Image: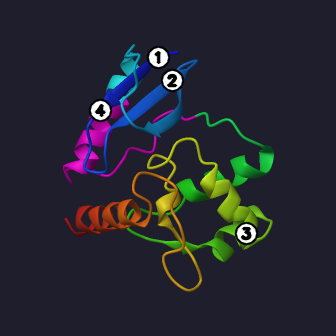
Amino acid sequence: MPALSMHSPVGDLTLFAEDDAIVALEWGWGSFQDPSPLLLRAKAALDAYFDEDAPLPDDLPLNPHGTAYRQKVWAALRQIPLGETRSYAEIAAVAGGSARAVGGANAANPIPILIPCHRVLGSSGMGGYSGGDGLATKRILLDLEQRIRAR
């Protein structure tokens, strides 16, 4: 499986591809590196994003593996504009299910950042975040997007 690691402000990240689509983004440096043109393109897009030069492109092919419900949630997350947030309840109103079910789908998101689960907040505040250093990483990503959007 093609894989490519990179450094970022939220820690080392490793991208994985399968059948010409990104299937995972994991925290940490992968022991196996086999970059594909798609992964090099995704890395360049992430580098520009983290450098606050550009939002992430909408046209990166993503193929997260998950249940039909999780697919609906992840599709709804991709519709949240850069620099904006939604509540778990608002995502549930779009994808169905409950706010708790949306939280479970967010926690299972295999392609964080590119599928922006960090843009979902709890009704009483930040909610949770399972990537990187948890809520500190979520805050970094949300602040970064505010700066990109302000440009």
The alpha-carbon separation of the residues under discs 3 and 1 comes to 34 Å
Is 64 on the left or on the right of 27, as rendered? Answer: right
Question: Is residue 24 highlighted in magenta?
Answer: no
> Disc 3 or 1, which lies upstream in sequence?
1
Q: In 3D space, how far apart are the residues under numbered discs 2 and 4 (Cα atoms)?
A: 14 Å
- Which amino acid, mark 1? Pro
Q: State the quadrant of the C terminus.
A: bottom left
Instruction: Give residue 17's mark.
Output: 2
Q: What residue appears at the point 31 percent right and 45 percent down from the top-left corner?
A: 11
Q: Is there a contact, CB below 8 Å, between mark 4 and mark 3?
A: no
Label annotation for residue 100:
3
x%, y% of residue 52? 21, 54
Q: Is residue 75 left or right of residue 28?
A: right
Give the mark nearest the N terminus, 4 or 3: 4
Q: What label sits on residue 6 in the rendered view? A: 4
Q: Earlier in the sequence, mark 2 or mark 3?
A: 2
Residues shaded magenta: 42-62
**Measuring 37% from the left and 59% from the top, which residue is drawn there?**
137
- Label 1: which residue? 2
> Where residue 4 appears, x then y in whole percent?
37, 24
Q: Is residue 108 above or below residue 88?
A: above
User: Which sits earlier in the primary sequence, circle 1 or circle 2?
Assistant: 1
Identify the secondary structure beneath mark 1. Answer: loop
For the residues marked 1 and 2, what is the alpha-carbon distance in whole angstroms?
5 Å
- Gap in angstroms between the C-alphas marked 4 and 3: 32 Å
Are dots 1 and 2 in contact, CB under 8 Å? yes
Give the residue type that dot 4 points to: Met
Query: Crowdedness of circle 2 by 10 Å Cα count: few (<14), some, many (20+)?
Result: many
Residue 94 quadrant: bottom right
- Secondary structure at badge 4 equals strand
